[in-house]
Image (cartoon, rainbow, N blue to C red):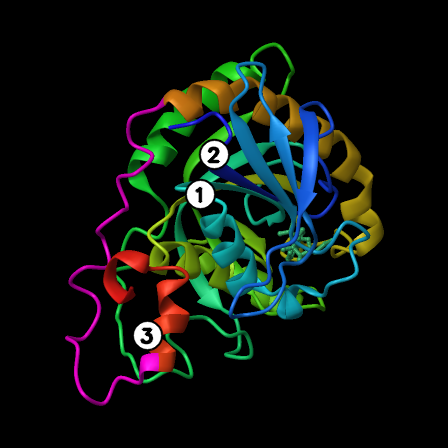
């Protein structure tokens, strides 16, 4: 593979709008069948010359509401650049006392509390039906690798890493009520955001290895006798969390680039797509070929 080829995509969330500790090469802005990504994508170079594609989920000026993030275009654009793996960063609320603002979390499960207003499948609106497996919503090998490597990258920085947690994704943009926050705790959820879905579902459909590096900013609304979360509270830790995230990214990306499991998700949709039939329109198959060329070209 030429070093020009991107293998890893990084999605930055609230507060993380660039990876300026990597060497910037150029901006690209691919138009996908689902429109343009949230922002032009920065192609950056690692010290070895390997290239990484970085995309700001809410746009570089944070102008896109969580419900309006063009997640299909984002995932499709990263795949079109050659990415097999997507590392997504996200600012999250904590539903557990032991997960403090400033801590990092690697979730392994998701509870969906979005409201059906976000297009959540590349197959939506087409004549092709597919049911991706989503029991393990993050790439298991990638998460296991991150558990070791992120822990190493955080050594000496006084930042705690929590693993094997459950994230609930709410619709927003308003934060939760106290009752909802307590309910999510009772459901076994540990952290909350407004972004991991449909991003993780779309990455699975596109056969990308996807994991979320969550950075806690607040205690949401479940703590009795404490103020509930406000955007101002979130902003207090965003800058430090973003600096730590950039350090983590710069530390792990080189080794991740060399990892042998990057393409493990490739082939995972093979038995998820309903067999070819006369009813499948050519135009839909062409559209889907953008993200799944192995099945639709
Ligand atoms: C700015 S607070 C709520 C906002 O922050 C998180 O964004 P991201 O996941 O992109 O870091 C959360 O999901 C909400 O969209
Ligand atoms: N408390 C919270 N709820 C939802 N998304 C968040 N992102 C950061 N904090 C959050």
Residue on which disc 2 sits: 5
For disc 3, the marked residue is: 285
Q: Answer left or right for 53 relative to 22.
A: left
Q: Work out whether residue 98 can be spotted.
A: no
Look at the numbered discs 2 and 1 and tell me whether their residues touch, using CB distance below 8 Å: yes
- CA gap between label 3 and label 1 equals 20 Å
Q: Is residue 271 left or right of residue 190?
A: left
Q: Secondary structure at mark 1?
A: loop
Q: Earlier in the sequence, mark 2 or mark 1?
A: 2
Q: Which segment is the magenta one?
A: 259-282
Q: Main secondary structure of the magenta part?
A: loop
Find numbered disc 3 in the image and state the secondary structure of the residue it sits on. Answer: helix
**Quarter of image, res 144:** top left
Residues at discs 3 and 1 in contact (Cβ within 8 Å)? no
Q: Tell me the residue that label 1 is attached to.
A: 82
Quadrant including the C terminus: bottom left
Q: Is residue 257 magenta?
A: no
Check disc 3: other Cα within 10 Å, few if <14, some if 14-19, many if 20+: many
Horizontal and vertical percent position of residue 147: 41, 27
Q: Sequence order check: which comes first, mark 3 or mark 2?
A: 2
Which tag, 3 or 1, sits closer to the chain's start? Answer: 1
- Residue appearing at x 37%, y 69% in the figure: 288
Note whether 207 is above or below 259 in the view shown: below
Residue nearer the viewer, 120 or 170: 120
């Amino acid at each position: 593979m030429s070093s020009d080829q991107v293998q890893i995509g990084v999605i930055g969330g609230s507060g993380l709008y660039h990876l300026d500790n990597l060497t910037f090469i150029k901006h690209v802005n691919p138009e996908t069948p689902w429109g343009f990504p949230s922002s032009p994508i920065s192609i950056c170079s690692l010290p070895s010359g390997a290239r990484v594609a970085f995309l700001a989920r809410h746009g570089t000026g944070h102008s896109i509401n969580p419900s309006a993030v063009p997640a299909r275009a984002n995932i499709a654009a990263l795949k079109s650049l050659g990415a097999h793996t997507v590392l997504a960063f996200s600012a999250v609320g904590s539903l557990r006392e032991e997960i403090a603002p400033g801590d990092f979390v690697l979730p392994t499960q998701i509870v969906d509390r979005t409201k059906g207003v976000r297009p959540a499948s590349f197959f939506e609106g087409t004549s092709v039906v597919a049911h991706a497996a989503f029991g393990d919503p993050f790439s298991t090998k990638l998460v296991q690798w991150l558990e070791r490597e992120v822990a190493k990258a955080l050594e000496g920085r006084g930042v705690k890493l929590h693993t094997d947690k459950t994230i609930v994704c709410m619709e927003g943009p308003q934060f939760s009520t106290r009752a909802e926050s307590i309910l999510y705790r009772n459901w076994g959820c540990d952290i909350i955001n407004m972004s991991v879905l449909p991003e993780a579902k779309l990455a699975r459909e596109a056969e990308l290895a996807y994991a979320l590096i969550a950075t806690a900013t607040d205690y949401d609304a479940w703590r009795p006798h404490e103020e509930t979360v406000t955007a101002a509270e979130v902003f207090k830790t965003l800058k430090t969390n973003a600096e730590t995230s950039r350090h983590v990214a710069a530390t792990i990306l080189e080794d991740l680039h060399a990892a042998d499991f990057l393409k493990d998700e490739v082939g995972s949709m093979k038995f998820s797509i309903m067999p070819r039939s006369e009813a499948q329109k050519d135009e839909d198959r062409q559209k889907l070929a953008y993200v799944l060329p192995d099945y639709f070209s």
